[in-house]
Image: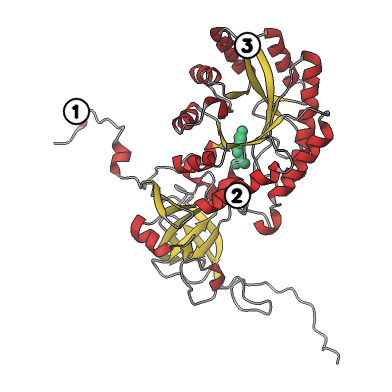
Amino acid sequence: MSLPYEKPAITRLVSGLMNKFGNRPAADRLVRTHIDGAPIERLVAEHGSPLFVFSERTITRSVRRLKQAFAQRWPDTVLGWSYKTNYLGAICALMHREGSWAEVVSGMEYEKARGLGVPGDHIVFNGPMKPLAELRRALAEGALVNADHHDELDDMLAVASELGREVAVGLRLNLDAGIHPQWSRFGFNLENGQALAAVERMARSGRLRLRALHCHIGTFILDPEAYGRQVAKMVEFAYQVQERFGFVIDTLDLGGGFPSRNRLKGTYLPADVAVPPVEDYAEAITAALQRSLRPGHRPRLILESGRHLVDEAGSLITSVVACKRLPDGTASYVIDAGVNLLYTATWYAFNVEIDRPLPGACEPSLLYGPLCMNIDVVHERVQLPPLPRGTRLVVGPVGAYSVTQWMQFIHYRPAVVLVGEQGQVEVIREGEDLSDLTRRERVPERLRQG
Ligand SMILES: Cc1ncc(COP(=O)(O)O)c(C=O)c1O
């Protein structure tokens, strides 16, 4: 039987409404009633809304998988937990329990790591600003300090003189690994000879010994082969400095940058398709090491993976405060968490789940926060059924960079809980109150009322 001719036509799809291509995503695919066995409703009843919830199981699973991927291929691999990604004490403690060192980029983070019991020689100190006192402490305690610029080399030389001994340090490189835009603000450029000149300066000083090379090519790197190119360049440079100046590189620190299963705005493919498995990164890195290292030379590898390890472990429960239609007809919702808590909404299109099945067709909806600022948009366009007031939403992944970049702006910062492996719920940061706002303020007597 032949089918009747159908004239080709381009039809605008109104997503959410029924059409001949189906009706996806269906509302029931968005439902999330529990986080690791803890009911959303109970979490909110006990700890309020909004609420950050971290999953211990998800963190341990991702750390162990990353460690395993490298243990099989390059046993001397160390993870340096990137504190700025999430420096909540409990999260750092979990990372350290799993064997991670600390990677810090400020005196504040350094102090926090030491306070959590991390020994100095298990700390990597990066970043463009390391005041002399912080540098002095880190070098005296045996941290791996990666030099960022010539002025810091001056300071390192001063500290070495004070200590009256040679000090072993690392050098941060920036290089072209095919990732654009290239991160070129940090460290010394490899291709234009800056890095070699810095090493020459160290060698001439007689007080600084180069033992490690560091490079962080960027973040959310979707191409594992970029790391292969990075490794090849770093190893070649290591042999160059060995031949010219006699420094033997015992550590290659590859920075962070492995992606999480989040979705960058503007990307077409979902994370499940776009993000390669972490084993592909391990393979690209270790294959490049095998290809470029000389026989018998097996430097320690440091990975400063941040978002990859913690992003999926974090969710934000938030509640619908009000439902509105914008003048152009867009369904929109005021929710109790905004960019004060989710600074990362600037570049991520988060997943949004609802806490119960709801009737009605999905339609593109706008979620905005409580800030009374036009920029306070958590999601510009997410498929949602009509949401009654009070609906709980689970927004994720938000485990990386949210609870470090959140702001105390207009509203108090909410509580953070950790759901343990046995389903136990523990507060790891209390919600703020007025005392957090005023504790360090001083109102001069003459300005006081009454
Ligand atoms: C030096 C350094 N190491 C590690 C990281 C962690 O990066 P990511 O979260 O992309 O793994 C960063 C982030 O910018 C960084 O600058």
User: Relative to residue 402, is residue 195 drawn left or right?
Assistant: right
* In front: label 1 or label 3: 3
193 relative to 408, above or below: above
Residue 235 shows in this picture: yes
Give the quadrant of the C terminus: top left
Q: Give the x, y percent position of residue 16.
A: 59, 73
Question: Which of the labelled discs sits on residue 62, or is there none?
Answer: 2
Mark in the foreground, 1 or 2: 2
Q: Horizontal and vertical percent for residue 372?
A: 40, 51
The tag earlier along the polypeptide, 1 or 3, is: 3
Question: Which quadrant does ligand 1 occupy?
Answer: top right
- Which mark is first along the chain, 2 or 1? 2
Residue 171 rendering spot, x and y as whole percentages: 67, 23
Q: CA distance from mark 1 to mark 3?
A: 56 Å
Of 114 and 447, the residue lying toward us? 114
- Which residue matches tag 3? 166
SS state under label 2: helix
Above-or-below relation of 183 to 32: above
Q: Quadrant of residue 216?
A: top right
The image quadrant that residue 99 belongs to is top right
